[in-house]
Amino acid sequence: MLRWIQGGISAVTGIAEPEYGSDYIHSVADRVKGKQPYRETSRKDLHWLAPDHTNVETATFYFTNLESGILGFAQIIHSNVIGIHTQAQFTFRVYDARVDNEDLNLWTSTKLENFRIDGPNFYADNLSVELDQDNRTYHLKSSVNEKSRVDLTFTRLTPGCKVGDDPSTYYGDNIGEPWGRMRHVFWPRNKVTGKMDLKVPVKQQEPEGVSGERVPQNTEQQAREQPKRKTDEDGDNGGDQPAEDEEAEEEEEELEDLHIEFTDESLTLSMFVMAFQGMKPHHAAKAWNFLYYHSKDHSLSLMEFITPKSYANTKVSVGIITSKDEVLGISLNNDFRHLNSSVDSVGWNVPKDLSVKLNAIRRTVPDEKIAAAVSAPTNSPAEKEKYNKDTQLNAVVEGKLHRLVERIDVMNEIPSFVKSIVSGVAGTKPYIYQYADEFTLQLQDASKEKGLAWAEVTFISEGETITDESYDEA
């Protein structure tokens, strides 16, 4: 009972948590051991949860055009802090992964007004996200920000998917009354059509080097050290105000119109994920890894988080592999490796390369076959090899992180009301590193294929332990 009270209080106030151990986290992977993890999503799975306690809920529509290299995402964020302050935000990113990132790297973040939820649909002034009655197509339309007016339709090419009947990881000693919860549902491969009308900075004349060659406007090192962003004036940048000269400079920035259209003739692919985090982010996880990859023939996505030591540094990892029109398998046994890492100016050990390995269970394997293998006595090498061939699907996605789209200081982005709750946590230093690069996929023993990947590496808490001394509740 005492631990339940401690957990409940910390989930509301943000104070330090005791070291509960692995018995106090119930991962989605543990609940499907010995079973087929794949389940197809229903319409109800796509409903916004919107409980009356602290949580953040997101619907994120990623898009990738393999021919042009244009990729990015449109995202709705709905948050509730301590049950007394609810707000919503529309964030948008578009980036060209095949040219210097000075040419197209647009970010907008806009506070939504008069927002409301209706099942799987979301509405606000000048914004709507609607799921059709066939549960096959989302239509997203937004004119909340003049820099990023979008009208996009996302149509499933494969079934939606989730892990098990309830795709949630629970925190606490009682799943029926958890202290916190993480949940994810996916549409792993979709087609995108529609248009984006953008306002982007006018391209400046590029300087000539001594040899006459083009001089890059933004080297990798410069990108890593770029200044903090200022959110749009109708958003909330946490109360941080730019200096007057910065404000004047931004006002004088010359913009030009850019129209981008996605048509059936040039296939644009998408991954959609609906995520729910029902507890303080620094209690739920100390780090996140995320990657989605599209090629002409396959899509792969992986989302994982690692809990703080208070929950035994537990890794919860969900990977999905698809063909053009089918979910091939779900993997809960993944290895997301950071390679050739070095400490940057912020202090995080940031990778320069990624290698992601998935060991998926094929979607068509029944529960009985999986359960029999788990409960069977030690099998012979031949039996194990046959079982693995019949039931498993292995994939490796690898690539170099050449293009840092942005390093995001999360504390500079979140609203001031939320920021006040976690700003006193000395051990918390959340940064998100976003990359867009060409990666390779090797599926089973097939030849490697090239595609485009979006990767995010997120660091939240320093070290393995956040002690009581790390928190300043004054």
Image (cartoon, rainbow, N blue to C red):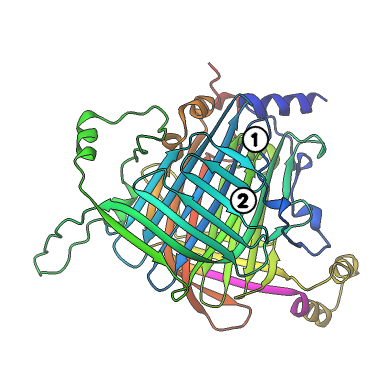
Where is residue 235 drawn, in percent x and y? 41, 35
Residue 325 shows in the view: yes
Is 75 situated left or right of 391 in this image?
left
Residue under the point 45% across and 46% down: 91
Between marks 1 and 2 in the image, the one whose residue lies nearer the viewer? 2
- Amino acid type, callout 2: Met
The location of residue 277, given as percent across then percent down, is: 63, 41
The tag on residue 209 is: none
Instruction: Give the mark nearer the N terminus: 1 vs 2.
Output: 2
Q: Residue pushed farthest left?
A: 210
Image location (x, y in percent) of residue 363: 74, 70
Q: Is residue 282 left or right of residue 378?
A: left
Mark drawn on residue 274: 2
Q: Secondary structure at mark 1?
A: loop
Q: Residues within 10 Å of mark 2 (few under 14, many from 20)?
A: many
Tell me the residue that label 1 is attached to.
279
Q: Look at the numbered discs 1 and 2 and tell me whether their residues touch, using CB distance below 8 Å.
A: no
Q: Reply yes or no: does residue 394 show up in magenta.
A: yes
Q: Residues within 10 Å of mark 1 (few under 14, many from 20)?
A: many
Image label count: 2
Q: Which residues are magenta?
A: 388-397
Specify whether residue 372 is painted magenta.
Answer: no
- Residue type, mark 1 in image: Met
**Above or below, 183 relative to 78:** below
Q: Main secondary structure of the magenta part?
A: strand
Is residue 308 visible to the viewer in this orientation of the structure?
no
Above or below, 396 relative to 229: below
- In the displayed structure, 252 sits above or below 422; it is below
x 55%, y 43%: residue: 123
Q: Quadrant of the N terminus?
A: top right
